[in-house]
Image (cartoon, rainbow, N blue to C red):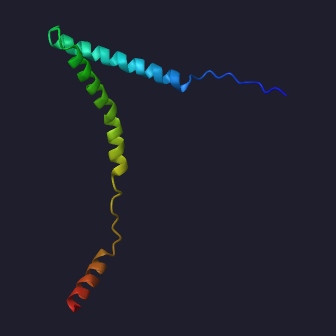
Amino acid sequence: MKVPVKKTTTRTTNAISEESTLNLEEQIRRRAYELYEQRGWENGHDIEDWLAAEAELAREKIKPLEAEAVKKARKAPIKKTGNSKAKQAKLVESIKTV
């Protein structure tokens, strides 16, 4: 018995990865050109501009991840039970007796 193969319309992970890589490269290229323009079209800094653009875009991508990590790392607020005065009084009494 032959099992029909389903055709999927979704892209493979490799294709998505390749597309995002090309998109990132284009973003870096544009930012590097902006840096070149800001310098007044001065030649000889192409690698410096490229690396600066890469670093800027990497920082932008990390910011949301850092914010999420901070949210997850936060401790829940301490809840007051209302018995703290009674507990403190017992503690004070136990210290006095020692």
Which quarter of the figure is the C terminus placed in? bottom left
Q: Residue 88: give x, y in percent of width and height.
A: 26, 79
Above-or-below relation of 59 to 24: below
Above-or-below relation of 97 to 38: below
Q: Please state if 17 lies on the left or on the right of 49 as rendered.
A: right
Q: Residue 20: give x, y in percent of width and height.
A: 43, 22
Above-or-below relation of 46 to 93: above
Q: Please state if 54 lies on the left or on the right of 44 as rendered.
A: right
Residue at screen point 30% across, 26% down: 57
Total number of numbered discs in the rendering: 0
Which quarter of the figure is the N terminus placed in? top right
Q: Looking at the image, which is closer to me, 31 or 68?
A: 31
Q: Looking at the image, which is closer to me, 36 or 43?
A: 43
Answer with the quarter of the image where residue 44 lies: top left
Answer with the quarter of the image where residue 42 lies: top left
**Extreme residue in the right direction:** 1
Q: Looking at the image, which is closer to me, 45 or 11?
A: 45
Above-or-below relation of 32 to 12: above
Q: Please state if 76 lies on the left or on the right of 98 as rendered.
A: right
Q: Residue 67: give x, y in percent of width and height.
A: 32, 41
Residue at screen point 26% across, 82% down: 91
Q: Residue 16: give x, y in percent of width and height.
A: 50, 23
Residue at screen point 20% across, 12% down: 36
